[in-house]
Amino acid sequence: MFDLTLPSVDLAPLLVGGLLTDRGVTVQLTEVEAYAGSEDPAAHAWAGPRPRTKDLFGPPGTLYCYLSHGLHICGNVVCGVPGRGSAVLFRAGRVVAGMELVRERRPGVADAALARGPGNLGRALGWTLADSGRMFAADGPTLEPGEPSRPVSSGPRVGVSVAHGRPWRFWADGDPTVSGYRRSPRIVPGRHDW
DNA sequence: ACGAAGATGTCCT
DNA sequence: GGACATCTTCGTC
């Protein structure tokens, strides 16, 4: 298990290569992003606790799931100081166990793409909004250390329109299961925006 | 009540 | 690289 009391920016690079398991499916993480809670304009926790984001403010080790674009379930592990809303978003991984189950959930998809992108990773694990609030523990989802498939690189987070100067996305560079970088169309040109 | 903005995915050229 | 589907949440009127 990881030390989930670490700040998200310190924990995130350690999670690359780590093994995320839930309900018989294991993915080796190849891409994650750190969000620094109430100190991070790009974080869901920035506006303070809301009905939708209440699980972000739970204890470290809480699974926070949110609905993205009305379709996709994305998952995070809450970490750091309790109540600050810090978390690491699981963006992509390689399926290493439960492959048959994942193929059923995502028919016709190439193996490398089964859990590529946060929404696809959530689908691979079968997550729904009801999974938000569960705890990482022996009887729930688990996170175990593992060796990254490639050297870990860092850069700006995908799709965020503010605080894009913070290189808080971490990935196994060159791994085919990593999602492509996508710049937010709403970043105002020329503005540094840390 | 209305409109815009998403921590996206997929298909198209 | 760009368009668009999709729908909840939130800000504003």
Image (cartoon, coloured by chain):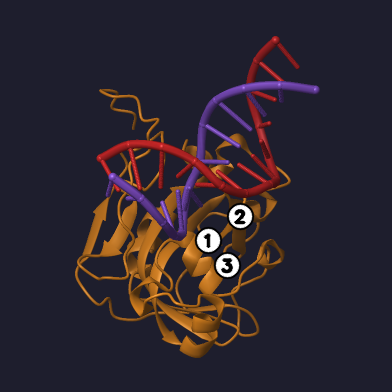
Chain colours: A orange, B purple, C red
> Picture coordinates of residue A32 (x, y %)?
39, 61
Q: In the rendered structure, which amino acid carries the disc numbered 2? A: Tyr
Do tags 3 and 1 sit on the same chain?
A: yes
- Please, is residue B13 above or below residue A3 in the view? above
In the rendered view, would you say A27 is above or below C10? Answer: below
Q: Chain of mark 2?
A: A
Chain under disc 3: A
Q: Is residue A6 visible?
A: no
Q: Between A186 and A132, which is closer to the camera in this rendering?
A: A186
**Which SS class for mark 2?**
strand
Determine whether the residue tagged by mark 3 lies in a helix, strand or loop. Answer: loop
- Callout in the foreground (3, 2): 2
**Foreground residue among A168 and A129:** A129
Residue named by callout 2: A66
| Residue A61: numbered disc | 3
Quick one: SS at disc 1? strand
Q: CA distance from mark 3 to mark 2?
A: 16 Å
Q: Position of residue A80 (x, y in %)?
A: 50, 57
Question: Which badge, 3 or 1, comes first in the chain's sequence?
Answer: 3
Amino acid at the residue labelled 3: Gly
| Amino acid type shown at disc 1 | Asn
Neighbour tally class for label 1: few under 14, some 14-19, many 20 plus, Cα within 10 Å = many
Q: Residue at x 51, y 81 (%)?
A: A102
What residue sits 63% from the left and 80% below the top?
A140
| Residue found at x 30% / y 51% | A181
Q: Residue at x 61, y 55 (%)?
A: A66
Residue C4 drawn above or below residue A141: above
Q: CA distance from mark 1 to mark 2?
A: 9 Å
Q: Nearer the viewer, residue A17 or B8?
A: B8
